[in-house]
Image: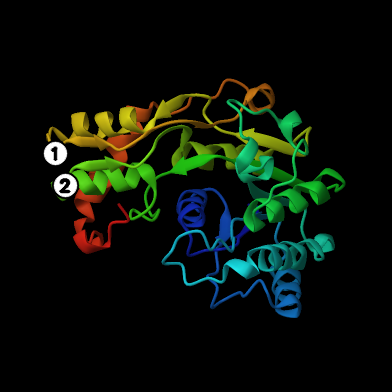
Amino acid sequence: MKKILITGGGGFIARNLAEQLSFEFIVDAPKKNELNLLEAENVFRYIKKGDFNVIIHAATYDAAPKNSGKDPGKVLENNLKMFFNIVRCKDYFEKLIFLGSGAEFDREHWTPRMNEGFFDKYVPNDQYGFSKYIMTKYTLASNNIVNLRLFAVFGKYEDWRYRVVSNYCCKVLMNLPIIIPQNKRFDFLYVNDFVKIVKWFIENNNRHKVYNVCSGYIFDFKTVAEKVLEISGKKTGIIVKQESSLEYSGDNSLLLGEIGNFQFTKLEVAIQDLYSWYQSQSELININEFHY
């Protein structure tokens, strides 16, 4: 049985990965107090001793959420330190899967359905995007690293105060209207689908170094809100403050050409799962903490 290390064990995606992959693999998902990725020698000892087949680097230093308490000036430095503290241990694992981001394409120049060839047409101006850009540059010259580039993943454990789908579910559960500051268009990917894709990369040899991991289905925020209301059976209302031409989406042709006929979960089915989960976890929701 393969042994998997998942970094950032307390994070949204890492928690879902650890929870679901543990049925088929030996999974170690330490939190920051158990493995501080900024401490190079401790990381080296941990990985060397762990004898891991695959490392999934899900940890990230993102200061974008206002409540994160993280220093925006440290995003580039810390993300790169964490990544390279793992990479320098390459002799002690078979494969490193790191979670990239559409931010690598530079937020100011996003176009609909960006494919892998769009990378490096622009250098990101923000620290988060630039850190992921540098990691991808290194990945392209590596032998045992693959970047699964993410766009808009959603599911349980995400920060309901800020993340679109969870925010809408929780608003409705609290009988509040859904407020949409800007009606953008995103390629939403259910986290359960992402876990299945990661499982494929654990078990198979990939032909390429970087893949856009997205559903290929684009929805505007208002449509997502309408689906939440329909599932809930409530009529709390939707307020769209401003329309937007921004679309955050990727071309997943390379991914599907590699993994075959993958069936993505329909958005309404995924929302139903997530809404039901929040119904059972209503104690997590504090009406005074909503971002908008």
Asked if residue 205 shows in the view, the reply is no
The residue that disc 1 covers is 236
Q: CA distance from mark 2 to mark 1?
A: 6 Å
Expressed as whole percent of the image width and height from the top left, the position of residue 165 reads 35, 41
- Identified at 49% across, 40% down, the residue is 152
Q: For the residue carrying disc 2, how many other residues have a C-alpha within 10 Å: few (<14), some (14-19), or many (20+)?
A: some
Expressed as whole percent of the image width and height from the top left, the position of residue 176 reads 16, 47
Q: Is residue 132 above or below residue 180?
A: below
- Identified at 51% across, 51% down, the residue is 17
Q: Tell me the number on the disc at residue 176.
A: 2
Expressed as whole percent of the image width and height from the top left, the position of residue 281 reads 23, 56
Figure label count? 2
Instruction: Tell whether 28 sits left or right of 270.
Output: right
- Identified at 39% across, 29% down, the residue is 220
Secondary element at image label 1:
loop
Q: Amino acid at mark 1?
A: Thr
Asked whether the residues under the numbered discs 2 and 1 touch, taking CB atoms below 8 Å apart as contact, a structural biologist would say: yes
Secondary element at image label 2:
loop
- Identified at 77% across, 48% down, the residue is 145
Expressed as whole percent of the image width and height from the top left, the position of residue 249 reads 55, 31
Q: Is residue 126 above or below residue 206?
A: below
